[in-house]
Amino acid sequence: MKRYFKFDELNTNYKKEFIAGLTTFLSMAYILFVNPDILSLAVITDLPDDLRMPKEAIFTATAIAAAVGSLLMGVLARYPIALAPGMGLNAFFAFTVVLGMGISWQTALSGVLVSGLFFIVLTLTGAREKIINAIPAELKFAVAAGIGLFIAFIGFQNAGIIVNDDATLVSLGDLTNGATLLAVFGVLITVVLMVKGVNGGIFIGMVITAIVGMIFGLIGVPTAIVGSIPSLEPTFGVAFTHLGEIFTIQMLVVILTFLFVDFFDTAGTLVAVANQAGLMKNNKLPRAGRALFADSAATVVGATLGTSTTTSYIESSAGVAAGGRSGFTSVVTAGFFLLALFFSPLLGVITPAVTALALIIVGILMVSALGEIQWKQFEIAVPAFLTIVAMPLTYSIATGIAIGFIFYPITMIMKGRTKEIHPIMYGMFVIFVLYFVFLVE
């Protein structure tokens, strides 16, 4: 075991790796409760039950997908990088695809499954690199920042901090409402924890907020902490039974969005964490193919179980900071996700007011990508800005990406920079124009 994970070469040991794995788990454990809350559209009170994903099954799917993905990354690629259903992609799945487009969650799961299978094929054939390189860096940063604004906006809504207003579309909510005050408290306490550099700050903030909510009678006290593992029966294998419904322009855009965002998340996280751990060699990532295969395979597994796209987590950097250097760190994290399966009774105390803080804080972290965009180049600023602002304003990640990908070749051609436009971008231009034509019809 020590030889396989190269403990001596990486100057690590079981103790360091265990502590690192636990640290990574605590840093991303919030997804166990946030993901079921988002995918079940818990904040939408008047949604028919048959349109709502079963929360308990999502919890189980989330934990197992995270465990399998982290285990694959640890054993195959031997990187200290953990995986779980991605933030932003789950919001896109629930609020854009299901709620906005009116696509059933069963068909949406089929879209996730197909995107994962495409990811595997592109990884094995080496075509993934060509697609990633075809998309300009500025648009990648814009997508990341736009998703950050979008999920933060959802968090503010879930908290009741931002509410609907017929005159101005949105307005400040009732800050005297108990649930809203609890959410504000949660954001404040989590900000303090994050500023202080506390590992697992988001998860700890949720725990503190839930406890305070119970003390003041805003959240019911759970009858148990440990319980049986919820059944996967309502969601398991559903993705395979609705594959016949994905052959539309609308679903093509959905699948491409799942694929693109997973590409960006994975590539950025792998490079960032591997560089932090000192695992990059000659500015290249060893075993990159294995790492990408682990990520794409985890998405297929997650879709089969019943959850949105599973991807590499930047929170893995917390484990690396704690001393994690090998894939055994991810193996430990996988073990904790499996152990978490027995804590499903806590789903009842993690209300939208509690999960709102996670959405807002993760949104803040993602918006940091704004600093990487060349705003002084107007031909770059236009598609980047429209991508970013369209996501929260249209309540759709796909629409933001579509607008940006349409405007990019237009502004670059007008600037005389046609040689910098990859042919793939012209193909994306046509697909996204058809997407809007289809929507108008």
Image (tube, helix red, strand yellow):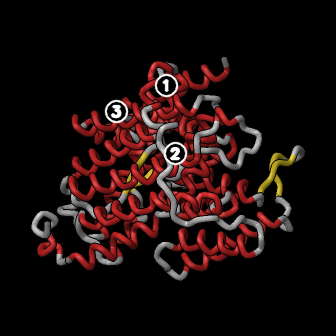
Q: Which mark is residue 57?
A: 2
Where residue 45 appears, as percent x and y from the top left, is 75, 44
Q: Name the residue type under label 1.
A: Ile
Q: Name the residue type under label 3.
A: Phe
Query: Which residue is under mark 1?
Result: 431
Q: Quadrant of residue 382?
A: top right
Query: Which residue is under mark 3?
Result: 118
Say which of marks 1 and 3 sits in front: 3
Closer to us: 157 or 23: 23
Q: Quadrant of the C terminus?
A: top right
Left or right: residue 292 versus residue 102 is left
Q: Secondary structure at mark 2?
A: helix
Closer to us: 431 or 183: 183
Question: Given contact means CB atoms under 8 Å apart, are the residues at marks 1 and 2 in contact?
Answer: no
Where residue 21 appears, as percent x and y from the top left, is 34, 69
Closer to us: 348 or 9: 348
Q: Is residue 361 above or below residue 267?
A: below
Q: Name the residue type under label 2.
A: Ala
Say which of marks 1 and 2 sits in front: 2
Closer to us: 161 or 109: 109
Residue at 48% of width from left, 34% of height from top? 109
Q: Can residue 416 be seen in this snapshot? A: no
Compute the Cα span from label 1 to label 3: 17 Å
Give the residue at the far left of this rendering: 3
Q: Secondary structure at mark 1?
A: helix
